[in-house]
């Protein structure tokens, strides 16, 4: 029997990681612990379902290059407020030559030499390295293949953002949950535009509105997993 896959999609800051954590808790806990209080207070008791991200391999590569722990790339403050001097590959919080997101998007499309003399936020570096460098030179499926080739058990993928990722997950028999957070607008990166295309083409198996309390979100996630016949 093939391993089951549940993938989480959504725009930046929509709550994908939170929903992935809730899915993991609900699928890894006995029935009498599948409640919000247990989710907040208790650790997962087993790991029948593993949680990964398409970006895990890329984050580990950048972590090794920068000499930091991979977990730092989950820290929003680190991604937005730490800058990388590309000439010396060193981190700083007082950069000398930064790029607005709009200018960054224009320059990175052609890997303009000006980027080499700029200081990028960690988030910008992740976008450039993951999409404009590795995917451009090693193929669009590099991170997909890296993830799916290493699946050894039922798996939750916490960061589905591209059309080819959706196609790969559905081809593998997986289900995809879209997290909709009202008021969140698509960012400039190509992945944000692709998420919207997936939404307009009705490519998601379930949509969860993250529009109230965390507790209500938890029970919405639980209801979706029941619809998927996983609870």
Image (cartoon, rainbow, N blue to C red):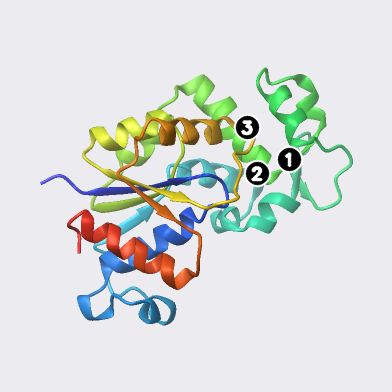
Label 3 element class? helix
In the depicted view, which residue is nearer to us: 34 or 207?
207
Residue 214 located left or right of residue 177? right
Q: Tags 1 and 3 in contact by the CB under 8 Å rule?
A: no
Is 98 above or below relative to 112?
below
Extreme residue in the left direction: 1
- Upstream in sequence: badge 1 or badge 3: 1
User: Gap in Å between the C-alphas at discs 1 and 2?
Assistant: 15 Å
Q: Which residue is mark 1?
A: 89
The circle on residue 123 is 2
Q: Which residue is mark 3?
A: 128
Label 1 element class? loop
Is 47 above or below relative to 168?
below
Q: Tags 2 and 3 in contact by the CB under 8 Å rule?
A: no
Label 2 element class? helix
- Upstream in sequence: badge 1 or badge 2: 1
Query: Could you tell me which quadrant the C terminus lies in?
Result: bottom left
Which of discs 1 and 2 lies nearer the camera? The answer is 2
In the depicted view, which residue is nearer to us: 145 or 4?
4
């Amino acid at each position: 029997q093939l391993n089951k896959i549940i993938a989480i999609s959504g725009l930046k800051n929509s709550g994908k990681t939170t929903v992935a954590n809730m899915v993991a808790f609900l699928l890894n806990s006995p029935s009498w612990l599948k409640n919000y209080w247990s989710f907040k207070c208790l650790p997962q008791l087993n790991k029948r379902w593993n949680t990964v991200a398409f970006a895990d391999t890329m984050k580990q590569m950048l972590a090794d290059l920068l000499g930091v722990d991979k977990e730092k790339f989950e820290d929003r403050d680190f991604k937005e407020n730490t800058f990388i001097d590309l000439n010396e590959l060193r981190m700083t919080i007082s950069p000398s030559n930064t790029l607005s997101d709009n200018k960054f998007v224009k320059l990175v499309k052609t890997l303009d030499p000006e980027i080499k003399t700029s200081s990028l936020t960690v988030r910008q570096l992740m976008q450039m390295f993951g999409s404009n460098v590795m995917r451009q030179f090693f193929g669009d499926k590099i991170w997909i293949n890296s993830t799916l080739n290493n699946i050894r058990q039922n798996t939750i993928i916490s960061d589905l953002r591209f059309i080819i990722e959706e196609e790969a997950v559905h081809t593998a028999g997986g289900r995809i949950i879209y997290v909709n957070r009202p008021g969140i607008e698509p960012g400039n990166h190509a992945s944000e535009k692709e998420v919207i295309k997936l939404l307009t083409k009705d490519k998601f198996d379930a949509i969860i509105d993250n529009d109230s309390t965390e507790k209500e979100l938890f029970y919405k996630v639980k209801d979706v997993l029941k619809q998927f016949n996983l609870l």
